[in-house]
Image (tube, rainbow, N blue to C red):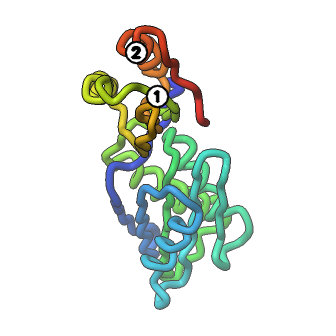
Amino acid sequence: MSDTLYTLATACQHSEDIKKSRFLAQAAPVQTPEEALAFVRQVSDPAATHNCWAYRIGQDYRFNDDGEPGGTAGRPILQAIEGQGIDHAVVVVTRWYGGIKLGAGGLVRAYGGTAAECLRRAERLPIVAMARLGMRCDFAELTLLKARLRELDASVLQETFGAEGVTLEVQLPESQVAEAQVRLTDITRGRHSARRLD
């Protein structure tokens, strides 16, 4: 299995009927726990029997069984997220009870399976590790420097003009940091170097 983590390109959903109960998994990309919990509130159906959920954002994760027996819903949803190599995502699985008890093993399979199938069908984007650099250049070098940084998928977060020139704060893929430092040194003929801000 590759070490590349993915996030969801967009929100998605998948539903299954299991022994007369209806299970609806809804997933979305999120950047913060607050965003994840807002999604949970937005898609939960108050008329449903249970709205179980889990999210993972880097090292931060939470899950909730919403009244199902402990460990039979939220944790299997989280395991589905991790098993699919997904990060920065939330999944809510809503259940409308159909009158047939599934038992603990059946619940684990139903919640985890519905979540996993939803994520399997989802459009994914690789998560690219980003870095922030601080750098300086003279006014005359700014246009060329910005053009060379754009070639590295860098975006300028902030630029400050001072008497001595321009100070930039730039975000770019981690894999491009060394090349950005080389280009800055070349353009400024060695007068300036980039420093890590993260």
Q: Say which of 160 and 62 sits in front.
A: 160
* Residue 10 image-quadrant placement: bottom left
Q: Spot the residue most to the front.
A: 163
Please state the horizontal and vertical placement of residue 60, each as a whole percent of the image. 66, 52
Q: Say which of 187 and 88 sits in front.
A: 187
Q: Spot the residue most to the bottom.
A: 47
Disc marking residue 43: none
Which residue is at 64% across, 76% downward? 66
Please state the horizontal and vertical placement of residue 29, each as a whole percent of the image. 43, 55
Mark 2: amino acid: Thr
Vertical position of residue 69 compared to residue 11: above or below: below
Please state the horizontal and vertical placement of residue 76, each as a whole percent of the image. 61, 55
Marks 2 and 1, how far apart at CA: 9 Å
Please state the horizontal and vertical placement of residue 4, each as a whole percent of the image. 48, 29
Residue 177 left/right relative to 67: left
Which residue is at 47% across, 50% downward? 116
Residue 65 left/right relative to 127: right
Mark 1: amino acid: Arg
Which residue is identified by label 2? Answer: 188
Q: Residues within 10 Å of mark 2 (few under 14, many from 20)?
A: some
* Comes first in the chain, label 2 or label 1: 1
Marks 2 & 1, CB-CB < 8 Å contact = yes
Does the image show residue 1?
A: no
Disc marking residue 136: 1
Residue 133 left/right relative to 104: left
Q: Residues within 10 Å of mark 1 (few under 14, many from 20)?
A: many
Which residue is at 38% across, 65% downward? 16
Vertical position of residue 170 compared to residue 18: above or below: above
User: Element at badge 1?
Assistant: strand
